[in-house]
Image: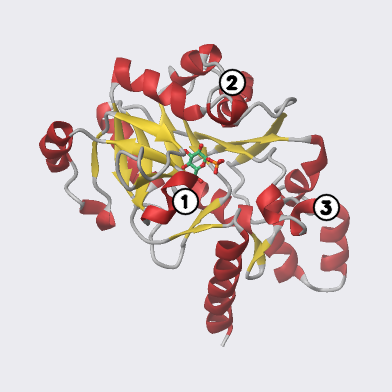
Amino acid sequence: MKKITHAVIPVAGFGTRMLPLSKSVPKELLPLGNRPAIHYVVAEAIAAGIKHIVLVSHAQKSAIENYFDINAELDTQLRHKGKDELADSLNWLPEDVTVSMIRQGKPLGLGHAVLAARPIIGAHDFAVMLPDVVLDPYTTDMSVDNLAFMIERFANDGHSQILVETVADSDVHKYGIAKLTDAIHAADTEVGTGNQGGNASFKVAGFVEKPSLAEAPSNLAVVGRYVFSNRIFDYLATTTASVGGEIQLTDAIDALISEDGVNVTTMHGDSYDAGDMRSYMQAFIYFAEQQLADDK
Ligand code: G1P
């Protein structure tokens, strides 16, 4: 049983798609309703059983770490004013969950960011969660769906897992796209029973990072949730820059596929790209509406 307890969240990126908002506020701290976007990603990790979260960060983004720290002065002041409930709500991280931070140093790509977490992750297998993608907590049960499902699959068969969802033709160029051969697809869809709230898992032949529509092997896009065997670090350490001049996680995954076999898990529920202005604005409205309805 290979239980995943560690998750890496890369937060060093500048968020150029979210300018001007992200010029002085890290995009991960932009609100979705009454909480910053990264709050939901960390809450998702905790619901799925993660105990140690590693933020791969940048000097200009220390406000993210502060969000997960206890502000003793604020805590004292709130309690002094009798606002104990509010103070308690700010200290929401469970006692047995640790959030640590490591710097990426150079902006050499997503693969490089994940590799930067190696000194903390050590020999553990681990999850990677991209903070741009926020899964809708109102339509899925994070303790069984998506990441939790992938962690369970990994514990059962040892194959790394990658979450995918179907995207429109006009969007394939924004994502890593799964490559399925007919034979592999037909043979392995039965592996995914679609239980546990709609997730299904099957083997994948490879990925193409941000293809044109003509080059796209399918419409199944990598959503930003991964469960990796520790071997991915060895591949990342030897991966050289490719698409966009960056060290791509996708290239290391291709190497992992040829050695170990990797499964994709189809996403259950909805996701929001909080790193894209249009989609972020829609997400904000959705989260705010849910919370206003809850407050009634
Ligand atoms: C990254 C990954 C890509 C994935 C996407 C999901 O790209 O490289 O495979 O589909 O996240 O958001 P980025 O959006 O960081 O350029």
Measure the alpha-carbon separation of dots 1 and 2: 23 Å
> Which residue matches tag 2?
118
In the displayed structure, does residue 214 sit left or right of residue 37?
A: left
Measure the alpha-carbon separation of dots 2 and 3: 29 Å
Q: Please, what is the three-letter code of the amino acid marked with disc 1?
A: Ala
Q: Quadrant of the C terminus?
A: bottom right
* Element class at badge 1: helix
- Which label sits in the foreground, 1 or 3? 3
Disc nearer the start of the sequence (1/3): 3
> Which residue matches tag 3?
24
Disc nearer the start of the sequence (1/2): 1
Please report the residue visible at 32 percent of the width from the left and 22 percent of the height from the top.
Answer: 257
Disc nearer the start of the sequence (2/3): 3
Where is residue 205 shown, x and y percent of the image? 27, 28
> Which residue matches tag 1?
47
Q: Quadrant of residue 86?
A: bottom right
* Element class at badge 2: helix
Residue placed most toward the observer, 269 or 88: 269
